[in-house]
Image: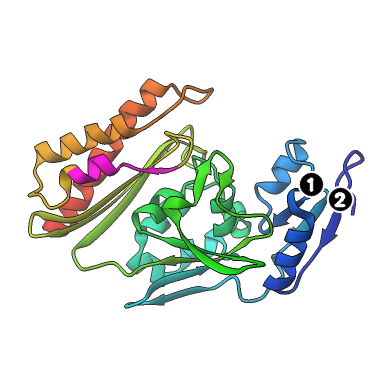
Amino acid sequence: MTYSSLEEFEYAVPKTVDEAVSLASEHGKDGKLLAGGTDLVVLMSRRKLTPRYIINISRIRGLDFVEYDKNAGLRLGAMCSLRSIETSDDIKENYPILVEAVKEMASVQIRNMATIAGNLCNASPAADTVPPLLVLDARVKLAGRGGERSVPLDAFFVGPGKTVMQAGELMTEIVVPALPQGTATAFAKIGRTPTDISKVSAAVLLTVNGKSCQEVRIALGSVGPTPMRARNAEEILRGKLITDELIEKAAKEASEEAKPITDVRSTATWRRQVTGHLVKSLLNRNFNRVSS
């Protein structure tokens, strides 16, 4: 198959996960997996990637599911489109933070094609689905020649465009635990336009009993080499009686934990300041939801 007059590649369409794993293992770094293609095709058109083998996994049956159980939680097939997440009643009701994030990603046309696994495996520090999934304590399932393994999403990213996935592995599923009572979640991002890539993003999960913080998770995007948890900021709140002063202190700590850079989109100083504002706003929003 010819992609352009300059670059040629071979094209395979496996029908099963095992076939895809075999092909990915065989071709190694020369091969690339194609799911929705919204990232891969763009990179190829710009000659930033020139793979010799394209392995289209979109025809593998059974990888595009959305399943929810009130006790077990949420399971998303790797080929689940962003649009199917956005329109799922189960996700809207039980994990609205995912809908908040997805609705601000690109256009409806792109969301119809883009997959959740593609957004994760691309390993962009600005990937909008990652901060919500981090605070939801998600895990990913990876299939390879050695079998299947489960990896906490917090341990999945190792650098810009880099993950712990080994040669020949592909993501098959994302698993999100059920949330306890008294939990609220929220996501926000700042971009050049509402659907543009994030300059800064943040997600917060807060579980309270009365006004006491039982659990808190804070995740940041676009302010480091990978999406990250602001664990020091979390510890300021966890187990404490929540006050305006404590929220202010946690937000300031989150901004200090951020590791932003200056690039063509924003300065490091601006990103750090905005991180604190976003975290403070999301903490207040969540607290007001569950303490009223």
Circles 1, 2 touching at the beta carbon (< 8 Å): yes
Task: Estimate how packed mark 2 is, as few (under 14), some (14 to 19) or many (20 or more) residues with alpha carbons within 10 Å.
Answer: some
Q: What residue sits right under mark 2 in the picture?
A: 9
- Magenta residue span: 227-235
Whether residue 103 is visible to the viewer of this picture, yes or no, is no
Rendered position, 288 above or below 192: below
Q: How many marks?
A: 2
Q: Is residue 231 magenta?
A: yes
Between residues 23 and 195, which one lies in front from this camera angle?
23
Between residues 161 and 279, which one lies in front from this camera angle?
161
Q: Amino acid at mark 1?
A: Pro
What is the x, y in percent for residue 189? 40, 40
> Mark 1: which secondary structure?
loop
Q: Which quadrant holds the C terminus?
A: bottom left
Task: Please give left or right for residue 245 compared with residue 15 in the image.
Answer: left
Residue 51's label in the rendered image is 1
